[in-house]
Amino acid sequence: MSSSEVLERQSHPGEALARATEVLGAAVTDPDRIPDDALRALIANVVRLYALKAENGMRKPLPPGGGGLTVTETMVTVTDLLHALNVQMFELAMWQAMSGNCIAPHQRVDVPHS
């Protein structure tokens, strides 16, 4: 691949993300296709980007229904992230209360809006 092709691909991050979404979606039926270290690095970068975008005004949760995630999938992932950073649920709740950094009631997807 030439350097111009690399630069062209880098200028279209939406296309790269769409392709990554396809690959990861297909890997759900065969998780061993994705190396653990690569997945961990991807999760770290996705979380970092999500947090940055949230701090810059993107305060909307995943699409309705959680983007297809199950409660168990979410709990496993969140638990592992908190454990990796040695953060307890109490600390998370305190941080949310002190910083006000939580989804505002009018942005919640699980509550009907009038």
Image (spheres, rainbow, N blue to C red):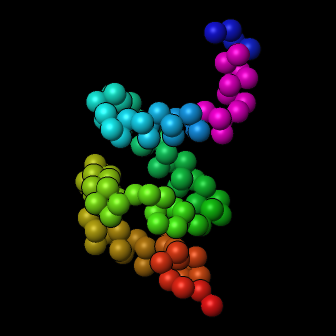
> Magenta region's main secondary structure?
helix
Query: Which corner quadrant of the image does residue 19 belong to?
Result: top right
* Residue at the image point whose x is 40% and y is 57% from the top: 69
**Is residue 12 rendered magenta in the image?**
yes
Quadrant into which the C terminus falls: bottom right
Q: Position of residue 36 (x, y in %)?
A: 31, 32
Q: Which residues are magenta?
A: 5-16
Q: Is residue 100 among what the camera can see?
A: no
Query: In the rendered view, does 108 fall on the left or right side of 95?
Result: right
* Residue at the image point whose x is 35% and y is 30% from the top: 34
Q: Is residue 16 above or below residue 106?
A: above
Q: How many marks?
A: 0
> In the image as oriented, which residue stretches furthest toward the top?
2
Q: Position of residue 99 (x, y in %)?
A: 49, 73
* Residue at the image point whose x is 69% and y is 12% from the top: 3
88 and 41: which one is in front?
41
Q: Position of residue 22 (x, y in %)?
A: 51, 37
Q: Position of residue 51 (x, y in %)?
A: 52, 55
Query: In the rendered view, does 84 fall on the left or right side of 53?
Result: left
68 and 3: which one is in front?
68
Query: In the rendered view, does 14 fall on the left or right side of 71?
Result: right
Quadrant into which the N terminus falls: top right
Q: Is residue 25 above or below residue 64?
A: above
**Is residue 108 rendered magenta in the image?**
no
Q: Is residue 114 above or below residue 16?
A: below
